[in-house]
Structure formats: C-alpha cells, structure tokens
Image (cartoon, helix red, strand yellow):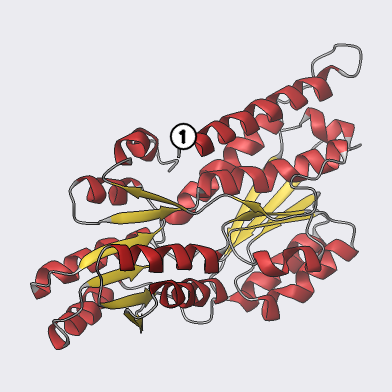
C-alpha cells in the first residue's frame, strides 16, 4: 500500500512539474488561470482545455465520490475544465459520450461496463479526433477501442486473489453479491472469486444496488434460509455495509469481505465488522484518467506505453488499515 501511495504522489509531482514547464515556455510569463484556462490548454492551441468524464455511477454509490475527487484534483493541477456526468444505463452512457462528441470537447474520460453498448460511441470519439482515456471498467477492450490509456485493476485477477483469500480464511460456503446486472466487470469479479476459491462453494446472489433496505432484506433472508453460509463477498463498499446489517439481523457468523473502500468501510474494518477490502485506488484512477488527457494533448505523452496501467488490487485488513485510515477520512481512499 505504501508503494502505491508513493506512486500517486509522484504522479502529482510530475503533473505539477509539467504544468510549470508549459506555463513558462513563453518567455517566463505565467499563464492566466483565473477562468479555468490551463498552461497545457494554451500549449495545445486552446485557451481552455475541456474534459468530460462519463461514468456508470449509480445513485447512492459513494465509491464514485473518490473517483471524482481524484479527477477534480488533476483538473485543478493542470488547469483543465472538467465536466462530470454519469448514468448506470450503458445505453444512456453512450448517449453522454455522443453529447461530448457533439460539443467538440478536448478529451473524454470514460468507463466501459458494457462494450456492446458503448464501444461504437468510444470509437466515434476517437474518429472525431478526440483523445479518449478509459478507467475502472473496460480494460480488456480499451486499447482495441482506440483509448490512449486505461487505468484500473484487472477484475478477473482481483477476483482470483479474493478466491484464494477465502481458501486461506477457511471458507466452505460463500456467496458473491452482485448489485447491478448487465455490468461485465462485476460478473468478472465473481467469476474470478469462484475460480480462485477452488473447491469452496461460491454462489452468485443478485440484489437491488439502488435500494439499501431491499439489499438488507434479501441477504437476511438468504442467511436465514442457509445458515451454513460462512463468507460473504460484496462488490462495493456501500453493499458491504448493508451486508453487515443483514448478517447481524440474521444472527449469522459469516465473515465479510468486499471490493472497494470508503471512509465508513475502513471504519468497519477497524471495528471488525468487515474482514478485508480490495483497494483498486479509485482516486488514482480518476486522477490519471484526466491527467493522461492533458499530457497527451499538451506533450504527446502516453502513460503506460500502450498497455493498461494497474491501480490494484491490494488488500486492506486489520494489519494495514491504520496506514490508510487518515486518507479514507479525507475521502480519498
């Protein structure tokens, strides 16, 4: 975890250094950023570089607050004007990509939970001469779609790591809880968990990710129906907190692990209500998605050299939770 935190700091420092270089290239005169203009935007021949970030965030999913904070920090450091939009429906998300194309923005940062629905729109953006960075979802397809970079974790690999953790923790009968049907990265996670777990039983359970009460009710009923469930894996921090309530209400002894973090989730690990969390460093994903577009536009740089840039996975548990607790309290982990 410490190594990745240092990497984030280095990325910020590199961005700041490049920004100073761009601002001083015209004879040492500082660039005017009072209206959101960036030195990088000027270097690209534009008084104001605009980037649109488009995600599949669903209402109430606090994971995306961390993504957005990273993106906003990168925009501030580079002087980019950032617009954030989202829709959990992949078809509507594709429409948001098209709207950004129509606005002739300088860059698009986008998640891709469903390439069948989003792929053509991303290709259209590239064909229109708009650089596209991808992050969080869609890694296997990113380079084929023409993205300049992808920043995230390999979901299947993360799932495998979780499955092996279940084995190490002595699990026999586990459930993997999916909060949104039709998103490939979520299915990949649970598939990876099942593969990594080997002979451990892993059942997929679908819940309504937009209804907290329904999640608790569905999972409580499952624990009551099958008291032999000894491990629960959720795919996001808010859903882990609801699963914890369901475990308590059902009187279950099941352990609980989750993908992704939040301030409240880190507290839950400290309180031993959650055993561990997979950290894919969403702040870093948002930061690099924006910064990579600025670097590409102003200096032709490509982070990762045409390869996906991994930001995770790494486990947070009782052994290292204190090391990230302060950052989580700031809303950046």
Residue 195 vs 17, above or below: the answer is below
The secondary structure type at the circle numbered 1 is helix
Image spot of residue 33 (x, y percent): 73, 26
Say which residue label 1 marks: 2
In this rendering, the answer to whether 329 lies above or below 153 is above
Instruction: Judge by depth and name the residue closer to the eye, 111 or 6.
Output: 6
Q: Residue at x 29, y 49 (%)?
A: 264
Count all numbered tags in the image, as a single digit: 1
Please determine whether, in this image, residue 133 is positioned above or below residue 118: above
**Looking at the image, which is closer to me, 97 or 181?**
181
Which residue is located at x 81 percent, y 32 percent? 40
Measuring from the top left, give residue 79's x and y in whole percent: 71, 32
- Badge 1 density bin: few <14, some 14–19, many ≥20, Cα 10 Å: few
Tell me which residue sits at (24%, 68%) in the image: 170
Please give left or right for residue 182 compared with residue 34 in the image: left
**Which residue is at the front of the view, 70 or 313?**
313
Of 188 and 118, the residue lying toward us: 188
Q: Quadrant of residue 171?
A: bottom left
Q: Quadrant of the C terminus?
A: top left
| Residue 235 visible at all | no
């Amino acid at each position: 975890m410490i190594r990745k935190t240092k990497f984030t700091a280095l990325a910020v420092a590199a961005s700041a250094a490049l920004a100073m270089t761009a601002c001083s290239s015209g004879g040492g005169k500082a660039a005017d950023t009072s209206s959101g203009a960036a030195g990088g935007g000027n270097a690209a021949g534009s008084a104001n570089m605009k980037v649109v970030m488009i995600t599949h965030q669903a209402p109430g999913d606090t994971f995306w607050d961390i993504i957005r904070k990273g993106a906003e920090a990168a925009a501030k450091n580079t002087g980019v004007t950032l617009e954030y939009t989202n829709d959990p429906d992949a078809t509507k998300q594709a429409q948001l990509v098209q709207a950004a194309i129509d606005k002739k923005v300088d860059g698009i940062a986008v998640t891709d939970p469903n390439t069948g629905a989003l792929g053509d729109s991303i290709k259209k953006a590239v064909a229109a001469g708009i650089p596209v960075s991808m992050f969080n979802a869609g890694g296997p397809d990113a380079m084929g779609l023409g993205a300049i970079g992808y920043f995230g974790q390999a979901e299947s690999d993360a799932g495998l790591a979780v499955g092996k953790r279940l084995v190490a923790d002595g699990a026999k009968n586990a459930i993997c809880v999916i909060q949104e049907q039709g998103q490939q990265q979520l299915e990949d996670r649970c598939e990876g968990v099942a593969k990594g777990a080997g002979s451990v039983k892993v059942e997929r359970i679908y819940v309504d990710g937009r209804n907290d009460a329904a999640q608790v009710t569905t999972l409580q009923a499952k624990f009551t129906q099958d008291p032999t469930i000894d491990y629960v894996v959720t795919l996001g921090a808010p859903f882990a907190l609801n699963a914890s309530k369901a475990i308590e209400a059902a009187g279950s002894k099941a352990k609980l692990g989750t993908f992704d973090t939040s301030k409240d989730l880190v507290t839950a690990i400290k309180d031993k209500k959650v055993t561990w969390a997979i950290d894919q460093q969403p702040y870093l994903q948002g930061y690099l998605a924006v910064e990579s577009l600025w670097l590409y536009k102003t200096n032709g740089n490509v982070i990762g050299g045409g390869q996906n840039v991994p930001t995770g996975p790494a486990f947070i548990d009782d052994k290292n939770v204190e090391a990230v607790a302060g950052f989580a309290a700031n809303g950046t982990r």
